[in-house]
Amino acid sequence: MTLFPKLDMRQGQQLVMTPQLQQAIKLLQLTNLELAEFVEEQLKENPFLERDESERAPQRGDGVVEKQADEPHEKELNIKEAPAEATAVVEDYEHMSGDSSPAEMQQAPSSGEGLSATDWSNSATASRSGGEDFDPHANLTREKSLPEFLIEQLHLATTDAADLMTGAFLIDLIDEAGYLRTTTDQVADQLGLSEPEVEKVISLIQSFEPAGVGARGLAECLAIQLREKGRLSEVMQRLLDNIDLLGSADLVKLRKKIGTDDENLRALIAEIRSLTPKPGLAFGHMDVQIVVPDVFVHQADDGGWKVELNSETLPRVIANQKYFAKLSSSCAVDEDKSYLKEQIANANWLVKSLDQRAKTILRVAMELVRQQDAFFIHGVRYLKPLNLKAVANAIEMHESTVSRVTSNKYLSTPRGVFEMKYFFTASIGTTAGGQSHSAEAVRQRIKELIDAETIDAVLSDDRLVEILKEENINIARRTVAKYREALRIPSSVQRRRLLRQAF
């Protein structure tokens, strides 16, 4: 067989991901904060991209979805997109502002005998706006963090340079709860010191306030607090050495371990409960990130549901066509014209992509509300099994698109703020056929049954399976145990001990 080169023509199809298409897909899965950062970068890079400062016209949707009559627990669902209220919010804020205009300040009454309340208000306003000696940052207050508080005590406790350096390194390793999450040998290897030198500085930090800080475990934290109170006896130390038995409520075994009677054991446990297991939480901690919902769901006057986008999370940008026409008409170099055309095309595409992203989020949210309207009316018990394919088929989109849209997007509903992914739950079959149950609804039912149990009727996992089967829920025992552990509910044996201890 002879090998030789030749030309061959073939016809085929393939999907080409253009940069614009990749950008549109990327925008779908961005959170509102990430989207704001991305748009800010584009505003800096693209000369034709500008913020849209004009008032946004009210946008209303007229989609009406009717539910079938064979579902008696669901209402007819009327989903509409409500108008944005950003302008009204700004006007209300300006109306509430206490600052006076210069004309109002000149008309304020004055008296030579003294200043009235109005004069004092105007003086404060003038000081805020134009005082040279006024420093707004000097009047800001915040909680002192735990590391700052410990560093201050470290400099008061010692002046040795090596101890200050070692102490600062150890304080940086202390978490928000006040625990030192490392070992002595690890710190010694990192700093090139001996273990006794490191242990000396750890003991120094453990003498600081709050009591118990710098401990390497719960038992050591409680021992430090008891030692400061003069309550660390030999029996108490034995109890701390077996603190895991106290956590599992195995009081019989604990009493044998420490060698005491029931009355003394109760006194020791009461002493333990008066201590602080996480002393560092009394100080400033990291700010909690507040979830900003992307979509609002309100109940309409006709009994349906009104779905609207959160206009505060939607960047408003436009492509400046007039500026492009002005520059392109005065540009004679072909390379410059090509650059201008590329930038205006990118600006137009971004505006279009942002608009398409908002519409896609709204369509998915509307379908979620339509599918799970029983949840909004009756609660978690009526949450239906739902997957991405069902939503994608209903709105004629691909499953990957729905997955990207629902990632890190939140709905604000009358029942709270939920991530869109929350409404996609697995299905659990029934014992007699019919409509399956949502896994989230089954978890909620297990929690309700356990919350209602008494000391004489603690439900085992097998008993929970029997009760759920009586309610037409076909579930295995291992699944009940998995759901119970996911809810952080102890076993029936541990719950019985806790109930006996409470009584």
Image: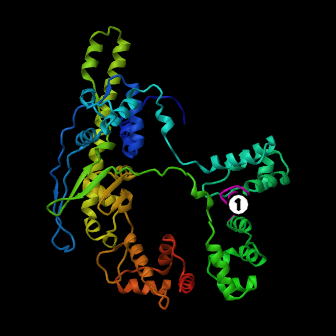
Residue 92 is left or right of residue 161, and the answer is left
Q: Position of residue 229 (x, y in %)?
A: 71, 68
Q: Could you say whether the residue bearing mark 1 is in a helix, strand or loop?
A: loop
Residue 501 figure quarter: bottom right
Furthest residue to the bottom?
456
Looking at the picture, tell me which residue is in the foreground, 5 or 501: 501
Report the residue marked by disc 1: 215
Can you say whether 370 is above or below 263 in the image?
above
From where the camera sits, is residue 214 visible?
Answer: yes
Magenta span: helix, strand or loop, mainly? loop
Q: Amino acid at mark 1?
A: Ala
Q: Position of residue 266 (x, y in %)?
A: 64, 83
Looking at the picture, tell me which residue is in the foreground, 33 or 288: 288
Looking at the picture, tell me which residue is in the foreground, 293 or 199: 199
Residue 55 figure quarter: top left
Residue 446 is left or right of residue 488, and the answer is left
Residue 410 is left or right of residue 281, and the answer is left
Residue range highlighted in magenta: 207-217
Residue 10 figure quarter: top left
Residue 502 is left or right of residue 52, and the answer is right
Can you say whether 127 is above or below 236 in the image?
above
In magenta segment, residue 317 = no
Furthest residue to the front?
113
* Image quadrant where one finds the N terminus: top right
Q: Position of residue 12 (x, y in %)?
A: 36, 39
Q: Position of residue 244 (x, y in %)?
A: 67, 75
